[in-house]
C-alpha cells in the first residue's frame, strides 16, 4: 500500500484538476469546485502543478477548434500540431503558476488560518493581474456563474478576485474539517454546521445585493438598442458572397433601427473592414466592430458612426490582444503575423471608456471581457452601461458559454446593463443583477431589439477595486508576524 501512495497522489491530483476544469463555466458549479479544491490544500507542489495543468486543459479545450488553420496560411499538416502545442503550452504555464503557489503554501504551513487567508488573497490578486496580460481567460473567480448567481452577487463588493479567494477559503475549511473528522477530534460536527451556516449567509447576502430597484416609469435614462448578429463564418468572411451578405444584413438592420425608433445599432467585432463605410446614412447612431489604420498600424476597434454619417467619427481600440491570434512577440521581424486573417494588430490605449456625446460607455472587445478591473475603472469614470463586441467563430458552444458567464460577472461587478454583440453568438442583454434578459440563438443571422437603463450608481467594487483582497492579505501577513514574534 505504501508503494502505491505516490501514484495515488498524482492520479488524484489529475482527477481533481479535471473536476475543477469541468466546474468552471459554462457549467459554473461552485460545490463541485470546492470538492476539487480540497486536495489542492493537501498536495505537494508537484501534484498541485499537475492539478493546475489539468484544470486549464479541460476549461480551455475550445482552443482545439482553431484547427484547421489553412485559411490563414498555415499548412494543413502543421495545423493540428500547432493548435495542440498552443493548448498544451497554456497548461504548462498554469501548472507552473499553481505549483509555485502551492510551494509557498507548503513553506508557510497550509494548516494555519493565516496561511489560508494569505494564499487565497494572493491567488485572487494574481487572477486580477493576469487578466490584464495576454495569457489569462477564465479562473476561479468566474466559477459561480451561471449556476450560482446568488454567490456571484458578492462580486458587487469583492470582484472576481474576491470570489476566487472565497472559493479557496471555503475549500480550505472543508479540508480542515475532513482532517479533524478522520482524526475523530471533538467539535467536528459543530465546525461542519458553522461552515454550512456561513455558506447560507454568503448566499443570502449575495442575493440581497442583486435585488434591483424598480425602474422609474418614463425615465429619460432608457435606451433602445438594436443588436445585429450577422453570423458570417470567419473562415469565409472575406469571400465576395459573404461580404455581400454582410452588407445586405447591415443595410436591413439600419432600416429596421430607423423604423423601430432605436437609439443605437451595434455590430460585433471585426464586422467592417479597413476603410469600409456604412451602406446608408441612416439617422441612427451605429457602434460597429471593425478595423482602422492609425499611424501606419492596424487596430481592431469599435467604430462610432454619428447619425446621418457613413464614416466613423470616433473609435476605441482593442488593448488586450489575443496572443498568437492577433499579436506575437517580435512579430514585426517575422513573416508570420499570427492566426488572424487580417494579420498583426497593434495595441490600443488601456482605458475602456468610450466618451460618446450621448453618454459614456465601457467597451470590451472580445478577449477584454476577462478584465473586470478595466471595466470597473470605466464605470468609475462615468460609463453608464457596458458593450461587449466579439467574434467567437469558429469556437464551440463551450467558449460562448464562458463568454456569457464573464459578461454576467462584469454586469454584477459594475452594477451596469451589458449588451453583447457577437458574430455567431452570444448576442444578449444582461441586467445589473447578472440575469440574461434576452438572447439570440447561436449561429443564426438575426437582430435583437433590447431596452436598457443608463445607470449612475456605483457598486462597492467600482469604488474600492481590490482593496478587500489587499486588506485580507495584509491582515494575514500581520497575524503571521505577531505569531512569530510571540514564539521568539
Image: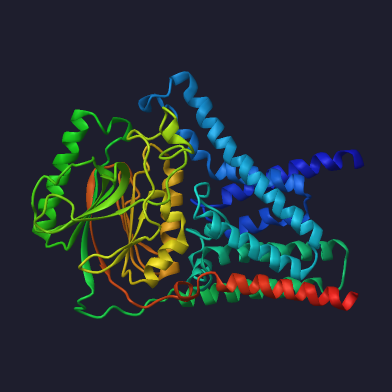
On the image, the x and y values in percent for residue 366 come to 38, 49
Location of residue 334 with respect to 118 vertically, above or below: above
Side (left or right) of 370 relative to 242: right
Q: Which of 82 and 9 is in front in this view?
A: 82
Determine if residue 338 is in view: no
The answer to whether any part of residue 178 appears in the image is yes
On the image, the x and y values in percent for residue 322 come to 44, 43
Is 216 or 103 nearer to us in this picture? 103
* Picture coordinates of residue 97, whole percent (x, y): 65, 49
Q: In this view, does 192 lie to the left or right of 31?
A: right
Q: Examine the image and state in which quarter residue 339 appears.
A: top left
Q: In which quarter of the image is residue 377?
A: bottom left
| Quadrant of res 387 | bottom left
Looking at the figure, which quarter contains the C terminus? Answer: bottom right
**Residue shown at 39% from the left, 48% from the top:** 347
Identify the residue at horizontal 44%, vertical 50% (top origin).
Answer: 401
Q: Can you give x and y, in whole percent of width and height, for residue 409 in the image?
A: 45, 62
Amino acid at each position: 500500500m505504501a508503494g502505491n501512495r505516490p501514484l495515488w497522489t498524482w492520479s488524484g491530483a489529475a482527477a481533481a484538476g479535471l473536476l475543477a476544469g469541468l466546474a468552471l463555466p459554462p457549467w459554473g458549479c461552485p460545490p463541485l469546485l470546492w470538492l476539487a479544491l480540497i486536495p489542492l490544500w493537501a498536495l505537494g507542489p508537484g501534484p498541485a502543478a499537475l492539478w493546475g495543468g489539468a484544470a486549464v486543459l479541460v476549461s480551455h479545450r475550445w482552443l482545439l477548434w482553431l484547427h484547421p488553420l489553412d485559411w490563414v496560411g498555415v499548412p494543413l499538416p502543421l495545423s493540428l500540431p500547432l493548435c495542440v502545442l498552443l493548448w498544451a503550452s497554456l497548461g504548462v504555464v498554469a501548472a507552473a503558476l499553481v505549483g509555485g503557489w502551492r510551494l509557498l503554501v507548503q513553506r508557510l504551513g497550509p494548516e494555519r488560518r493565516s496561511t489560508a487567508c494569505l494564499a487565497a488573497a494572493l491567488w485572487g490578486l494574481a487572477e486580477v493581474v493576469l487578466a490584464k496580460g495576454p495569457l489569462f481567460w477564465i479562473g476561479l473567480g468566474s466559477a459561480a456563474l451561471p449556476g450560482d448567481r446568488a454567490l456571484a452577487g458578492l462580486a458587487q463588493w469583492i470582484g472576481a478576485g474576491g470570489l476566487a479567494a472565497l472559493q479557496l477559503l471555503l475549500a480550505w475549511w472543508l479540508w480542515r474539517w475532513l482532517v479533524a473528522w478522520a482524526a475523530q477530534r471533538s467539535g467536528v460536527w459543530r465546525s461542519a454546521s458553522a461552515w454550512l451556516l456561513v455558506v447560507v449567509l454568503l448566499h443570502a447576502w449575495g442575493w440581497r445585493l442583486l435585488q434591483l430597484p424598480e425602474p422609474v416609469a418614463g425615465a429619460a435614462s432608457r435606451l433602445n438598442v438594436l443588436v445585429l448578429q450577422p453570423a458570417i463564418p470567419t473562415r469565409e468572411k472575406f469571400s465576395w458572397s459573404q461580404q455581400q451578405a454582410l452588407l445586405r444584413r447591415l443595410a436591413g438592420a439600419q432600416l429596421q433601427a430607423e423604423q423601430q425608433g432605436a437609439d443605437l445599432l451595434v455590430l460585433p467585432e471585426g464586422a467592417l473592414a479597413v476603410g469600409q463605410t456604412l451602406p446608408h446614412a441612416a439617422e441612427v447612431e451605429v457602434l460597429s466592430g471593425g478595423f482602422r489604420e492609425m499611424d501606419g498600424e492596424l487596430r481592431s476597434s469599435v467604430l462610432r458612426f454619428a447619425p446621418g454619417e457613413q464614416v466613423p467619427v470616433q473609435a476605441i481600440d482593442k488593448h488586450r490582444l489575443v496572443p498568437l491570434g492577433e499579436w506575437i512577440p517580435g512579430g514585426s521581424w517575422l513573416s508570420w503575423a499570427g492566426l488572424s486573417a487580417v494579420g498583426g494588430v497593434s495595441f490600443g490605449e488601456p482605458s475602456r471608456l468610450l466618451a460618446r456625446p450621448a453618454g459614456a460607455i465601457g467597451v470590451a472587445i472580445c478577449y477584454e471581457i476577462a478584465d473586470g478591473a478595466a471595466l470597473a475603472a470605466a464605470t468609475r469614470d462615468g460609463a453608464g452601461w457596458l458593450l461587449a463586441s466579439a467574434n467567437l467563430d469558429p469556437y464551440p458552444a463551450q467558449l460562448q458559454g464562458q463568454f456569457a458567464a464573464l459578461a454576467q460577472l462584469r454586469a454584477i461587478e459594475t452594477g451596469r446593463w451589458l449588451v453583447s454583440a457577437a458574430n455567431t453568438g452570444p448576442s444578449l442583454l444582461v441586467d445589473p443583477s447578472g440575469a440574461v434578459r434576452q438572447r439570440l440563438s447561436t449561429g443564426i443571422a438575426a437582430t435583437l431589439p433590447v431596452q436598457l437603463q443608463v445607470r449612475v450608481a456605483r457598486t462597492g467594487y467600482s469604488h474600492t477595486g481590490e482593496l478587500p483582497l489587499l486588506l485580507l492579505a495584509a491582515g494575514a501577513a500581520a497575524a503571521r508576524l505577531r505569531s512569530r514574534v510571540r514564539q521568539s
